[in-house]
Image (cartoon, rainbow, N blue to C red):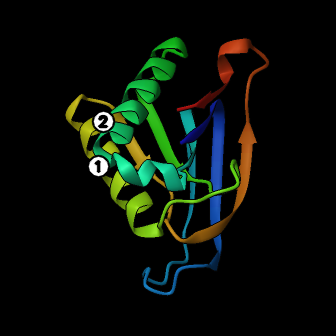
Amino acid sequence: MKLLLIYADRFGYRTTLKTIDSEPDRDETQTIEKALIGFIHLEQSDEADPAGIETKLVKNLKWAARKNETNRIVLHSFAHLAETKASPELAKRVLDGAQERLVASEYEAIQTPFGYFLDLELSAPGRPSARIFKSL
């Protein structure tokens, strides 16, 4: 798994192009303030241990959220950080599981529409903890 974690003063998205036919049709726009945005890429090798990779994801998201003093986390499937990709089914299952675990730990966890390209708007402060890359 590859994670690009960006703390954003403001993060916005709008659905544009559906890429997975089995996902429901959505015309959605949302703006979220003061949140950690997790750009999450699950790799083919992650298929060997989905539970373990979900645990690593949740731990890293919580750690980065604490560093940036927020309890709001956005999970964004971003399959552009590595050469191989896990199946969409596994990626969705891990994102859903991570969201449930974060909510159970009293975080506000928001998931962007899965299976869509999105127009993105991002405003991030210029400090080291606002931009973190992890390869797990």
Q: Quadrant of residue 100?
A: top left
Which element is circle 1 on? helix
Q: Residue at x 44, y 32 (%)?
A: 72
Is residue 12 rendered to the left or right of residue 67? right
Residue on which disc 1 sits: 97
User: Is 42 in front, or is 102?
Assistant: 42
- Is 63 situated above or below 118? above
- Is 121 situated above or below 118? above
Q: Mark 1 or mark 2: which comes first in sequence?
A: 1
Q: Is residue 18 visible?
A: yes
Of the numbered discs in the image, which one, if any, rests on residue 12? none
Residue on which disc 2 sits: 102
User: Which amino acid does the dot numbered 1 rest on?
Assistant: Gly
Which element is circle 2 on? helix
Q: Residue at x 52, y 32 (%)?
A: 136
In the rendered image, residue 50, in percent from the top left (x then y), is placed at 34, 48
* Residue at the right extreme of this rendering: 126
